[in-house]
Image (cartoon, rainbow, N blue to C red):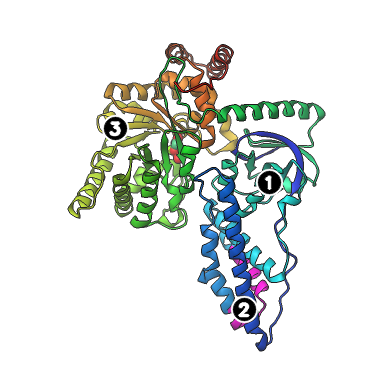
Amino acid sequence: MLRGTPVSPGIVVGRVYKYRRGFSVVKRIKLRSAEVKIEVDKFRGACRQAGVEITEIEKTMLRQLPKGQPAPFEAHRMLLDDPAFTGRVEREIKSRRLNASFLVRELLDEYEKKFAALDSPLMRERINDLQDVGGRIIRNLKGEMQPALSDAGEQVILVAEELSPSETTNLLKKRVIGLATDSGGPTAHWAIVARALRIPTVVGLGSLRERTQNGDLIILDARRGTVLIDPSAAQVKRYRSLERDWREEERSLRGLRSLPACTRDGERVGIMVNMEMPEEMETVKEYGADGVGLFRTEFLFVEEIPGEEEQFRIYKELAKRMKKRPAVIRTLDAGGDKFVSKLGQDRELNPFLGLRGIRLCLSNRRLFETQLRAILRASHYGNIQLMFPLISGLAELRQALEVLEHTRQQLARKKIPYNSDMQVGVMIEVPAAALVATALARLVDFFSIGSNDLIQYTLAVDRGNQSISYLYEPLHPAVLRLIDMTVRAAKEGGIHVSICGEMASDPALVPLLVGLGLDSLSVSPAAVPAVKQAIRSMEGRKTRKAVQNILSSDDPELIRRQLERRVRASRRKFGVSYGKGR
Ligand code: PEP
Ligand code: MG
């Protein structure tokens, strides 16, 4: 069994179709001086043709994708006019007198080496775009055809190194029932498209291409992020039945989109989405959520540090698209495992306990003020809210609020509009913050519990370390008591409390979280329907009582079993509720 990162949930059993993008071998050819101009013209023609192909693909994609989903081809188009790419090839045809396809190949190899060393998902995505555009140009120069996914037979699981957004268009032909790649991360553009199309997808499997042949039967479990190679007859039987259940569930969940997240006894719970890339804004409507509960802005800072105008443009777009719905923007949470190379941070021995989150921003006032100004300015155009990550105490929060006040005054002096009532909150993700939550609640409008970090810091378990992952337990009584403490402090202080860590995306834990009194859950977009369904099939009052009993338990396993029993019981009692909205 191979393990990767699940990107779009589902279970499928199918035959492998290995997809290799590419073109035949590219030779190095020295040109005579009379041939140089002809080669330049040929190269320009190949670029133009690549542009036409990209526009065609974009049109198809826009027709097929859910409405409003942006087709991510801007980066491709920019590459076609980039002086460092097409401009450089053209210059070198003239100066080195070499054939265009060789020069494009050479440049692709050079960038690949350079970017591969940086180990950043965004850089990998950039090289992926570059490969796609470069491959098109080379194929056009050589008069070759794009290998088509549509060559695959019916119902295959596509296995590839990685894909590009343009290649995913062929997925729309419905021949591909699942996607499994050896590289790539969940934020790649093509992965976002796969998610929007709801094709079960797992990325980062490492060696699936090496271990399989075309036509091999595999089982892709994109809920867990695993691939079973050469399964036994019993496994195939079991998974085919799970696949049928999943498809049935998918059909039913789609009906939930326009229904509110209300418990059986009429309590409304907010369902928000977590987003990392601007392209994900549309998932709010697409999945029927109430707004954005967490915009992780650090992904904007991975390649370059964006200036105020660039940030303002993105945040304003978010505000306008959300209309009245809330959109919570979290200030830069770099450091820890999110190393932003351009910030020039020193390597630390203990980065998770070091200059991370709000600490980094407070130590770099210019960076912090720039972002705060951009967020404040965007707040004029919609329901933007702001929150600070990794607050560990009162003094730190006061300091952050002072900087915010200072930037408000800067804008007021320049008569730049902003929403002076913009809601401001803190993330509760350090145990110390949960323990002093009552005091923090007096200074802010809302709390958002970052359980990913709260678990890591409470249990002293590095959230990314596989060898101790068995200790990473969301149901540890210490974690639950800190969440309970935070919710109580919020209620006493009369402020809103939500949770945006991964545990909120697990439908089995939803009764527990709602029972603890959380006002809203912010989850990964694809989890919205299942979380909504879990809310719609529980009884608020009864669950709250039961959760108080659960809180007195010291055994996570016992807690898990109790929760599972509750979920099964309410399924039996209510089935799934898809009727008209209450
Ligand atoms: C969290 O810690 O739960 C959280 C949502 O923040 P991040 O995962 O970005 O650290
Ligand atoms: Mg966090």
Name the disc covering residue 505, or none: none
Residue hosting label 1: 173
Q: Which residues are magenta?
A: 92-111
Q: Earlier in the sequence, mark 1 or mark 2?
A: 2
Q: The disc labelled 2 sits on which kind of residue?
A: Asp
Magenta run includes residue 319: no
Secondary structure of the residue carrying numbered label 2: helix
Instruction: Tell me the distance, in whole angstroms, between the alpha carbons under discs 1 and 2.
Output: 35 Å
- Image coordinates of residue 535 in percent, x first then y, are 48, 22
**Residue at horizontal 70%, vertical 60%?**
146
Secondary structure of the residue carrying numbered label 3: loop
Quarter of the figure that contains the C terminus? top left
Q: How would you rate the neighbour count of disc 3 (Cα within 10 Å): few for under 14, some for 14-19, many for 20 or more?
A: many
Q: Is residue 113 visible?
A: no
Q: Is residue 304 or residue 358 the one in the foreground?
A: 304
As displayed, is residue 194 above or below residue 131? above
- Image coordinates of residue 154 in percent, x first then y, are 76, 42
Residue hosting label 2: 41
Q: How would you rate the neighbour count of disc 1 (Cα within 10 Å): few for under 14, some for 14-19, many for 20 or more?
A: few
Quarter of the figure that contains the N terminus? top right
Q: Is residue 384 or residue 118 the one in the foreground?
A: 384
- Image coordinates of residue 462 in percent, x first then y, are 51, 36
Residue hosting label 3: 445
